[in-house]
Every structure is written in structure tokens, then in C-alpha cells.
Amino acid sequence: MLTDRPNAKGLQLFYAAVPLLLSFIISMVSFFAAVFIRGFYYHTNISEESAADDGIFYLINYGMQIIIFGGWYYWLKQRDPDLQASGEASEKKAKKRSKASAEAEGKAWNPVAYWAKRLPLLIILGYALQLGVSGIIAVLSEAFPSLFSSYKELIQSLAGSGVDWLTFVAVSFLAPIGEEFLFRGVTFHFAKKALPAKWAILLQAVLFGVYHLNVIQFVYALGIGILLGMLAHQAGSVVPGIVLHMIINLSAYLVPSVFLDNIPKAAFTAAFSIAIAIPCCILLLKRKKHN
């Protein structure tokens, strides 16, 4: 096969990095579009600093991601038999895992029903991950205030009390769709052609961390990116990852400040959340063995 040649694998790795580079170009275009719209339509001036945190910027940025990377991923699925085979293989595994219950109920395996049953697990896991990360950051920010000062400003601009509804919609609903198409869709597709699955999952997670352009966000985005990559690999689809990603982002607006207002509370919140998240991950990714 062509993809077995070293130079072909190198080309696939290059293709895996292209979506990240393209996302930076999309961000620049979105920035200037937001400046133009604010100035021309709303007749308001915004500085370079505020433009990057403007709801219109996020709306344009993630909207373009959905169109470009969603279309790219759909095109790959239509023309690439390997991507279709991945989904078919995942479907066969899921059918096998649920064979006993399906036969007992006399029903054919349904992927929508299969993942719908796991929606409560996704909701619990998403909120637990958000609480856990928030708790850890709250503890570390007290120990290293200078390192976390810029990060706190970023989070306040995204999830603060004065956030506008455009930012809320873009960050909570559009960003998960666009980013899953980008990383677990297109990037992961090309990475799998050059690397074993576990290394492809790690690569797309690293690129997902780099995408956030922030050391603090890189660390936890790397971990969450690995989880989302494993979920996409198991499901053969980006849909479960989109759902989990949305829950994580939405949960940022639902973290009570009282849980994090001092180190003991934040540490307990982090430990308790992690204790919940770990078994949820195991259950979500568990593969039952059949004789």
C-alpha cells in the first residue's frame, strides 16, 4: 500500500498538522471580520485585545471551523474506504458487545440508542472533568499566582458574569463541534494513516493542546484530548466526543464559586471529581469480552 512507504507516512503526518495551521488562519480572518462588523454595523470601536474576546469573533471563528472542517471530514468519509471501514469496524465491535442484550430483546443494534443510553454517563463525566480541572487550577493558582494570572483573565472573559450570549453560544455549542471535526475528525484521520492508533490519539491530543496557545490550557487539553481521541476511536464517529465536549464547555458556567473559594474546598472538589471521573471513563471505554 502507498501509506506503508516512509515518505507517504511523512506526508500523512504533514496532512495531520495542516488543520491546526489552517485553524490559526481562520482565527486571523475571524479577528478582522469581528473588527469590521463591530465598526461598520454596530459603530463601536474595539481594541486588538478586546476583539479576540468578542462574542462575534468566537461566532465567526467556530462557525467557519464547522463549515470547513466539517465539510472536509464529510468529504474524507465519502471518498476514503479506510475511514468508512473504521466506522464499520467500530459498529461491529459495538454490535458484538451488545449482542446478548439485543438477542434477549429481539432488537437489532442501533448506534443512536447505544450512545443515548450512555448520555447520563457522558453528562456525569463531563461535569466531573470540569470540576476536577477547576479544583486543581484553583489550588495551583494559589501556589503560583503569577503563572495563572493571564489564565484567570482568559477564563473570566469566557465564563465571567458579564459574558455575552454570543460568546456563550459559540463556546458552549459551536466550539465543540468545530474542534471535534478539526482534531478527532480530520487530524486523527490522517494521523492514523501514519501511526498506530495509540500514537495517533496522542498526536492529535498534543496538537489540540498547542491549539489553545496557553501553557495551562495545554496541560489539561492534552488529557481531555486523549480521552476524546479514545472515544472517537472506539465509536468510529466524532458524535459522542462532540456531546462530551459540549458538556465540558457548558459545565464551565455551572461551577459554583463556593466550591473553589479556598484551598481545602478546591482540593476536596478536585479529589472528589476525579474519583467520579475515573470509573466513568472506565465504564465508557470498557470493552466486554465474549467467548
Image (cartoon, helix red, strand yellow):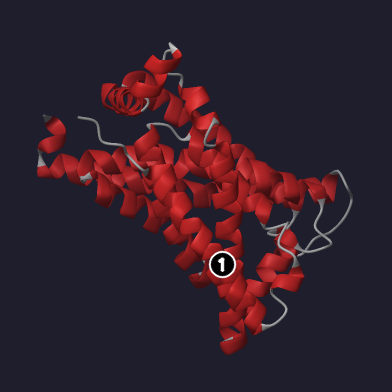
Tell me what residue is drawn at x 67 percent, y 54 percent.
251
Tell me what residue is drawn at x 61 percent, y 70 percent.
269
Image spot of residue 219 (x, y percent) = 45, 67
Residues 192 and 114: in front is 114
In which image quadrant can residue 45 be found?
bottom right
| Extreme-right residue of the structure | 43
The quadrant of the image that shows the N terminus is: top left
**Residue highlighted by disc 1:** 272
Disc 1, SS = helix
In which image quadrant can residue 130 be found?
bottom right
Using residue 261 as the reference point, say whether residue 16 is left or right of it: left
Image spot of residue 164 (x, y percent) = 82, 53
Residues 2 and 253: in front is 253
Tell me what residue is drawn at x 33 percent, y 20 percent.
79
Image spot of residue 122 (x, y percent) = 55, 44
The amino acid type of the residue labelled 1 equals Phe
Give above or below for 142 relative to 122: below
| Extreme-front residue of the structure | 104
Image spot of residue 2 (x, y percent) = 13, 31
